[in-house]
Image (tube, rainbow, N blue to C red):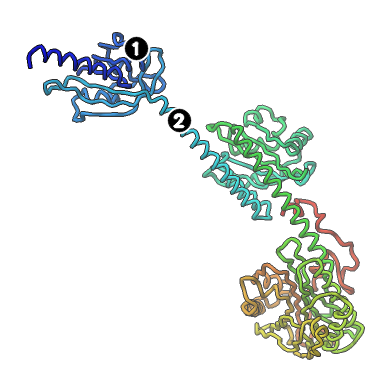
Amino acid sequence: MGGTDRITDRASGTVFLHAVLRDLGAGVLTVDTSGLITFVNPWAEHLLGRSAEQMRGCDAHDLLHRRHDGSPVPRELCPMRTLLQGGRAEELSGEEYFLRADGTTVPIIWSAASLRVAGRRAGTVVVFHDFSLQREAEERAAARTAALEALTARLNLVADVSVLLVSTVDASGMGRRLLRLLVPRMGDWAALDLWPEVAGEGERFAVRGPRGGERPVALEEPLPPLPERSRRAVEHVMSSDEPVRTTGEELAAAPDAPLATTHRVLFDRLGGRSAVVVPLRARRRSFGMLTVARAESAPPHSDAEIRLLSDIGRRIGMALDNIRLYHEQRNVAETMQRQLLAPLPQVGRLRMAARYLPAQGAMEIGGDWYDAFRLADGVTALVIGDVVGHDRQAAAHMAEVRNMLRALAWDHQEPPSVIMRRLDEAVTHTSDAPMATLIFARVEGGEGGPWQLHWVTAGHPPPLLVTSAGDTRFLTGGHGPLIGMSAVLDLGLNWPDAYEDLPPDSTLLLYTDGLVESRGRSIDLGLAKLRHHAGILSRRMAGRTVDDFCDELLERIAPAGDDVALLALRMPAAGEGTPGDATPPPPPQSPHSPAAPDRAAPGSTVERPEVRDPTRATGRGEATWE
């Protein structure tokens, strides 16, 4: 090949190389070993808004390299200069920002390699692309991810709050757990204020302080009486559907500001710059306010956060109204039950105590009852019973069976077995009451003793006799069928009379199955537990009243689920009360009982008092909140 051909080939190669650099679709620039620009392709001119003549001979770093905001990047932090400084790396890449001629920055993704001529380093070539579209796509994706994460966090918070609100009927406990969910997720501190009535006394039920700080118990107290202006402001907030913004600075600068009386102390004690006060309403009823505050360093709540707090406030209001309805129904049910229970008579030196624990369900009034009364022959009768069912109908049937038994026992001075047969026939033929279990007993003996128990059992758990020495024994005699079963089925079954001497200072316990049986405990284990604790308490509580004995026994056994009726009889000491006996009488029997408040049996210290309805209780809002 001749010289002319070689020159032609070189020229063609140069034209081809320039065509490649021109149409590459990426910016290309070269710099010498001093970092001065020696070549710029047309695409780089387009990306940077500068001509090759304007850039050639300029320091590439000083002219182009910038941060996102356009500020210079220190030379020692420039990764592109690493190749110029003779490092081992021959190729580098990354993401940076270049400065355009109009003063804006353009995000680029770049790759650089060392240039060598005859084996010697001659500079660096940098190939870069406009990364704006990719960067914007990444930023949009990051924004969508952040928005999705924020939405997920809000939904998780709402779910956590909802689970809490539907799982409790205790307003104060619910309030404290609720604030633990809101702090620090929604603010630096929070407070829950409840008003059964705006015109009445409100109470700061729960306060959650800044994270890591001590619980501000001193702030959980009744709120001071409100001046007229503050009362109107609180009434406005509580009756509104929209939250109210406030700031610590506003309350400090204006002591007569609408919410200063209720909220200034919170900012003084807990700090903070801004707060949102959310009304708690449901079914056209106002319950109070939820306040969530942010510290000085945190921005105020956004509109989205306020909407979230408003939704949480509505859920709290609904939960508080459900709690109100639950306790109102429970109080109505318990009032009905207690109206059906009988006060205890006071008989000589015999001492009796009764306890009734309602079922845990709101309307689960039941058929459990106890009874004690004097018979026409002067003997004291004891009854414990349970009509099948846990509703108002069971309670009504219980009243039927109880009254039938009272009338039969009073009118017929007959053994318990005969009374039980008459009752079974009367229930079967004159009532729609279902089956019932019960014990009917006569406590027979004169003043000073000896005393004897004469009883029958209709399918009921046996009485427990506890001596003063702590010996215990179930009285298993006298067993017969349930009331309402023998006559219906024409079985011809009966109830054998049973007798047992009652030792001096002993205690007789009659109880329903709710005391010894539950879903998690069999009746055999329950009976063993009752016997164990009764024996221990009899020894440890010598000299204490039978009321104290019952209270301690219930605390130890802690029955749960079904309703419980308990009747205890404490016998006097041997010879006590006989003519010439100088022994002081035992402490007087309590004139009250689990029956309705202030009711008393004939012969008691209180007779025919006004019956009060506990659902109308006033004061600290116990009928509404607790």
Spatial CA span between label 2 and label 1: 28 Å
Dot 1 lies on which element? loop
Specify the quadrant of the image occupied by residue 257. Answer: top right
Q: Quadrant of the N terminus?
A: top left
Q: Quadrant of the C terminus?
A: bottom right
Specify the quadrant of the image occupied by residue 423. Answer: bottom right
Residue located 74% across and 86% down the image:
504
Name the side, left or right, on which 296 lies relative to 326. Answer: left
603 versus 230 height, above or below:
below
| Local crowd size for mark 2, using a 10 Å CA cut-off: few (<14), some (14–19), many (≥20) | few
Residue of label 2: 139
Lower sequence index among marks 2 and 1: 1
Q: Amino acid at mark 1?
A: Arg
Q: Nearer the viewer, residue 407 or 310?
A: 310
Q: Nearer the viewer, residue 201 or 192?
A: 192
Residue of label 1: 50
Residue located 86% across and 67% down the image:
599
384 versus 192 height, above or below:
below
| Local crowd size for mark 1, using a 10 Å CA cut-off: few (<14), some (14–19), many (≥20) | some
Give the number of callouts.
2
143 versus 4 height, above or below:
below
